Amino acid sequence: MSRSRQPPLVTGISPNEGIPWTKVTIRGENLGTGSADLIGLTICGHNCLLTAEWMSASKIVCRVGQAKNDKGDIIVTTKSGGKGTSTVSFKLLRPEKIGILDQSAVWVDEMNYYDMRTDRNKGIPPLSLRPANPLGIEIEKGKFPQKDLEMLFPGMSADFTSENFSAAWYLIENHSNTSFEQLKMAVTHLKRQANKKSEGSLACVKGGLSTFFEAQDALSAIHQKLEADGTEKVEGSMTQKLENVLNRASNTADTLFQEVLGRKDKADSTRNALNVLQRFKFLFNLPLNIERNIQKGDYDVVINDYEKAKSLFGKTEVQVFKKYYAEVETRIEALRELLLDKLLETPSTLHDQKRYIRYLSDLHAPGDPAWQCIGAQHRWILQLMYSCREGCARDLQGPPGLHSATLDLDGDLRASVPGHVGQTASLKRGSSFQPGRDDAWRHQTPHRVAFVEKLTKLVLSQLPNFWKLWISYVNGSLFSETAEKSGHIERSKNVRQRQNDFKKMIQEVMHCLVKLLRGALLPLGVAEGGGRQCRVWEVKAELSGQGLAHTIQTLRLTYESLTALEIPNDLLQTIQDLVLDLRVRCVVVTLQHTAEEVKRLAEKEDWVVDSEGLTSLPCHFERCVVHSLQSLREVLECKPGEASVFQQPKTQEEVCQLSINIMQVFIYCLEQLSTKPDADVDTAHLSVDVSSPDLFGSIHEDFSLTSEQRLLIVLSNCCYLERHTFRNIAEHFEKHNFQGIEKITQVSMASLKELDQRLFENYIELKADPIVGSLEPGIYAGYFDWKDCLPPTEIIDCE
């Protein structure tokens, strides 16, 4: 016999021991291609082929017969693979025989079953009442939706035991991918099964035919004898006597077997009850199992058990089942409340929120738990923001003006601190000008700057998860397939309203962020919002330009992070407006601070003159202005989506006026230095450049400066300012896109020329006073008065 497949191999049997006629499940490999391919099955040497039911190529179900051996192998033989082997064995138990009147604690398996539909016992075949595979070929479940099949076959069923059984539905559901040859084999198998049934009934009739004939003859003989005797109605006749004997025999039998039969009925009832408890122990134990799994946190197990119980007993009419199912519903309702509390609990991770929402949707919780979670998260973010403001306000009551924590320059919101200004060709004279405030500011952050960093970090830590939760809510990924189908219609009705509500939530968060930041950074009347916001940050000094530049960089990084979440730009416009206001304020504050720095430059004048007759004061001035403009470089730079600082005419005018003010302050400093009394000049550090001995030859050995020398030095500095310094500063203004540069230059030059003219006149006056003093006495020598002279009367011609 040719073999096209490998020999069968049995790798498992369940159970692996039992009494005769125990139902077992055999598992292995190559166990045949169908019922027709299975030609042999022995367990412990007993042929079990008659009770075998082929399920698939890896599974066979049968009953163990009366085998001779107590333990043996399981051998499967097929047409395609031949005789197989086994890696497991079966142990046959030998229970003691029990008589009909003997008591026993072991139930004898009479193969009865409890039918829920009729509540009565029925005899069943050796395997089961409902064979799992009536066609005898391998079942291949199709992927056709159950709803489509129900619409295609209305009122029908794929259950072959049902009165409305539809063969077409059964084939589509279980054999949609089966080949035509296998279906032909299935037809042959059905015919064979039908023939077995008809042949079994006919054989029973043939085997008992002689008994039927003998019974018929006996009944005919008794009937003839009774007719011949004619005493069938006479009392004491044979018939009457026979009836009395039968009644006595019946009473005696009842007396003898009443106790046994009573015990049998009671045993049947107990066995029936145990069968029901065993069959439905899942429902009876479910309330306790739900409580235990809730305590362990195994919510998935609870949901699966609940769905199973709901499908089996959700519409039951049995009172016992109704009672237990009501207990299950009570515990599930408590679980819904518990999960909702955990969902709305804050703080919570996005993973936990999605998990609890999925659980609630699977449990068909009323309302919309996902939207409730979004609302709770929105309120939590607002609460955190206000708590952050209150905490920083309390810290402000401590050391005034400075935050105790150091600035983390390595964090995600790191702002670049302006570096030192490099030397340029126009600044090659004099010592470098380094403001002393950089190092101190770098190690101690102002309260309000630290508050900005803390608040923006808080928003960036909470808002991404809040936005992702909304996206998951919109696309339905928060819900399982069943919950998605059931809730899709309800959510689609409210989607437009939900979108509007969520947009308002984001706007409220952005408005709150901007409101708190304005109250902290622009407290002197520039901030928008209520007075309470401004009073929280009441301080005497306003933030410096460096602090504002740091906060601008922080807000820019915050805006970029929020844009990366694909939040619409119109929802973030308030942040852009705040950044623009801060940039304008930073420019104004920096220029104002520069004017103060320039005002103090007079203290740095050392009157050290170089070969060109200049001191270091013009160089200090230029360095001071350039350093301020360099610190504004990133502030003035327009990032994507930002507007120019100088787009408003009011801002242009204010910045132009501040720039002019810086120039005029320095001009005023020069004027003050030119008229400074000798007693106010610190001459302890003065020196003279030996390369120009004739320039200030009149300076005494004690290095004291005369008024003429100070005027000459200041005039020399004014000349240098006009030719170089003011022009260089104008170029830097233009480089940084300042507006009104011509006006700044014209007004500054006019003021400088006016000062130069006044100083020059003062110098001429000082130099002319000695000459006038020496000439004036000679002018009045030989003084005469014309009144004393006679007036001329005629003209005499000398020729």
Image (cartoon, grey):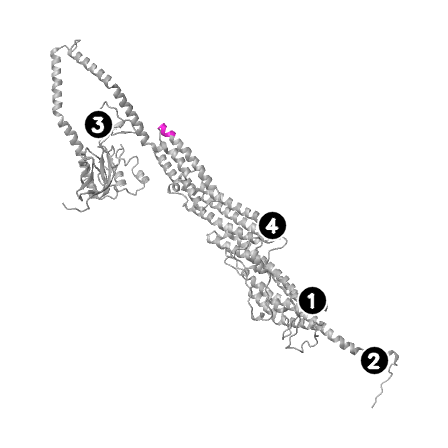
User: Within 10 angstroms of label 4, few (less than 14), some, or many (20 or more) residues?
Assistant: few
Q: Marks 2 and 4, Cα distance to the nearest angstrom? A: 82 Å
- For badge 4, the amino acid type reads Gly
Q: Is any part of residue 116 visible from this angle?
A: no
- Single out the mark in the foreground, 4 or 1: 4
* Residue hosting label 1: 672
Q: Marks 4 and 1, Cα distance to the nearest angstrom? A: 42 Å
Question: What's the residue at 36%, 37% (across, down)?
Answer: 305
The kind of secondary structure element at disc 3 is: loop
- For badge 2, the amino acid type reads Ala
- Of the residues under marks 3 and 4, which one precedes in the sequence? 3
Q: Quadrant of the N terminus?
A: top left
- Single out the mark in the foreground, 3 or 1: 3
* Residue hosting label 2: 781
Q: Are marks 3 and 1 in contact (CB under 8 Å)?
A: no
Q: Quadrant of the C terminus?
A: bottom right
Q: Nearer the viewer, residue 444 or 522?
A: 444
In the image, residue 94 lies at what x, y percent?
22, 31
Q: Are marks 1 and 2 in contact (CB under 8 Å)?
A: no
* Residue hosting label 3: 97
Q: Give the magenta part as a residue range.
A: 318-323
* Residue hosting label 4: 398
